[in-house]
Amino acid sequence: MKIIHILFLFTFISFTVCHASVNDFCVADLKAPISNSGYPCKPVASVTSDDFVFHGLVAGSTNNSFKLGVTYASVSNFPALNGLGITAMRVDIEEGGLAPMHTHPGATELIIMVQGELTAGFVTPTSTYSKALKPGDLFVVPPGMMHYVLNTGKGKVTAYVAFSSEKPSIQTLDLLLFGNNLPSDLVAKTTFLDLDQVKKLKAKFKGSG
Ligand SMILES: *[C@@H]1O[C@H](CO)[C@@H](O)[C@H](O)[C@H]1NC(C)=O
């Protein structure tokens, strides 16, 4: 390596380090008002080791129509994640259960399989990508892709999930289409579904109209 390259590398590294040391972290002060640029930082003097630990990524209740239990650690309950662009989630799915078609705009999702068999997939305008996953497998869902997971094995599924956002949003297709108060005939026309089917799904997803 030429000396000029080495010098350049050192300049680059020291710039990066200096830049980071201005603000090593910003543990969110959840009690302060949130602005467009996020939560203000808790004063560094009052930050402790406990701030960097989250307890309770345990199995969530699966007593719902999807047989799906979800537990999150995001900036709202784990303030140290503020500004770090990452979230953790635990998913438990009983036999035959699922997470219906949904997207996370702006967040990549990484599924880490721990127990059972989970079929995960996403669709694009031109293709579908789907796979049955076993413990030790990872599956990545690129940002914004419409995707699903389904317990296709015997017994329970447990998986952990990481999102590349400290507060990923969730848009569930059926909730958007049938959890709203638009007139059912309008929904039927604009989705090309039968009116009876729309009414049935509006009842299931607590829509009105
Ligand atoms: C599951 O939920 C239903 C309705 O919310 C409730 O009546 C029932 O007791 C729950 N079962 C268990 C095992 O928690």
Image: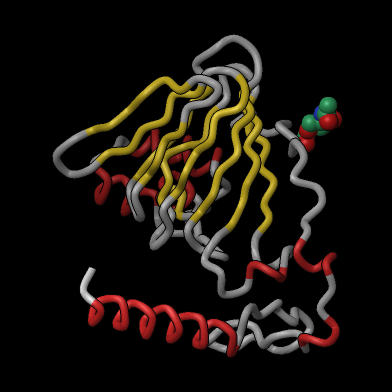
User: Could you tell whether 122 is left or right of 63 in the image?
Assistant: left
Q: Nearer the viewer, residue 21 or 198?
A: 21
Tell me: residue 76, above or below residue 184. below
User: Could you tell whether 114 is left or right of 44 in the image?
Assistant: left
Tell me: residue 82, above or below residue 11. above
Instruction: For the N terminus, give its image quadrant.
Output: bottom left
Image-quadrant location for residue 75: bottom right
Q: Nearer the viewer, residue 134 or 186?
A: 134
Please name the residue shown 39% across and 34% down the image.
196
Q: Nearer the viewer, residue 189 or 76?
A: 76
Tell me: residue 120, above or below residue 106. above
In this view, the residue farthest toward the top is 154
User: Residue 152, position in %: x, y?
Assistant: 49, 16
Please name the residue shown 68% across and 36% down the image.
69
User: Residue 174, position in %: x, y?
Assistant: 44, 44
Please name the residue shown 42% across and 35% down the image.
139
Splitting the image into four quadrants, where does ligand 1 fall?
top right
User: Residue 26, position in %: x, y?
Assistant: 66, 80
Image-quadrant location for residue 5: bottom left
Tell me: residue 65, above or below residue 7. above
Please name the residue shown 79% across and 68% down the image.
51
